[in-house]
Image (cartoon, grey):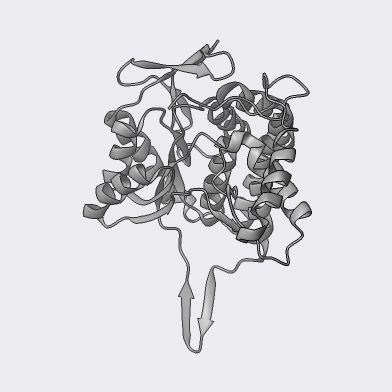
Amino acid sequence: MRTLHKHYIGGEWVKPSSFTVRDIINPATEEKSGEMILGTAADVGLAVDAADKAFETFAFSTVAERLELLNAIAEEYKKRLPEMAAAITEEMGAPAGLSAAAQAPSGLGHIAAIVKALKAYSFHEDRGTTRIVKEPIGVVGMITPWNWPVNQIACKVAPAIATGCTMVLKPSEISPYSCQLFTEIMEAAGVPAGVFNVVYGEGLPVGEAMSRHPAVQMMSVTGSTRMGAAVQADAAPTIKRVVQELGGKSANILLDDADFEKVITRETESVMRNTGQTCTLLSRMLVPADRMDEAAEIAGRIAATVVTGMPNDAATTMGPLANST
């Protein structure tokens, strides 16, 4: 059983201010697989203080130093790829093949993309006699979802490091194992103390405390519309910058000249991956009325090839829903 009983604050694994835990349920077995500490506003305060202190020096790190750090993180990540895939399968039920081929490598992919972008990025722009300098904003609060857990962590953390920001992360309370492993990767890579901090817990009170804290300059949020509205409201009094991705399923419009066999096969297979729990999946197809029967036949035929089952079975292409809610 996995036990996540400490937050990661100021480069150390720190005991919580109050010892209250939440059971983590393996969605494939519906049995307890571990437990996670529930953080408080006091824990958030300690984490923000650590990030704010670290920002005093990390903000002045050079591009070369940040590149070296990102590359070190990538190297440590590569060593833990199989473990990361297994953690994601256990925590949110993604088939083992999907975890190994897409879920776990996606985090590494984001780090590589940011390394490439940082090498070509200029932090100043000259306009005539004026120089515009782009500076790190400060402490960034991050809230990530359960459906692509390490993907969303990496795509927030890597840009923050690249720009010289420090951060406090609250991962999903449904799928925290990948975050624990990612934190171990960050520690092994030598990320300076306080640059990266993790407080486990639920939206109330952890997300709320992050959004309201005056030393947090920006909130980066991926989640539900309800959660996004709460963060926006909590951040307003301190005039934070708030970046939100409150994704939902989108329509797929097929015009009459489309190759129905090719497109519907591709999109039906795609929407079944990750048990449909991906915000970019095109889950509705709008087709010409006189081709509805043709479209339905193709979609039904492809859907029938999906193999549901336990996520660690090699034949399984669709695992369980990540949670009962």
Instruction: Evaluate whether residue 14 shows in this view.
Output: yes
Quadrant into which the N terminus falls: top right
Q: Residue at x 54, y 42 (%)?
A: 152
Q: How many marks?
A: 0
Measured as percent of width and height from the top left, residue 181 is found at 59, 27
* Vertical comparison of 78 with 137: above or below: above
Q: Residue at x 31, y 21 (%)?
A: 17
Q: Residue at x 59, y 38 (%)?
A: 276
The image quarter in which residue 121 lies: bottom right
Answer with left or right where residue 81 lies relative to residue 16: right
Answer with left or right where residue 117 lies relative to residue 324: right
The image quarter in which residue 208 lies: top left
Measured as percent of width and height from the top left, residue 100 is found at 73, 32
Measured as percent of width and height from the top left, residue 77 is found at 68, 35
- Given residues 171 and 195, the one toward you in this image is 171
| Residue found at the far bottom of this picture | 128
Answer with left or right where residue 131 lies relative to residue 141: right
Quadrant into which the C terminus falls: top left
* Vertical comparison of 142 with 119: above or below: above
* Vertical comparison of 172 with 20: above or below: below
Instruction: Evaluate whether residue 71 shows in this view.
Output: no
Measured as percent of width and height from the top left, residue 7 is found at 43, 25
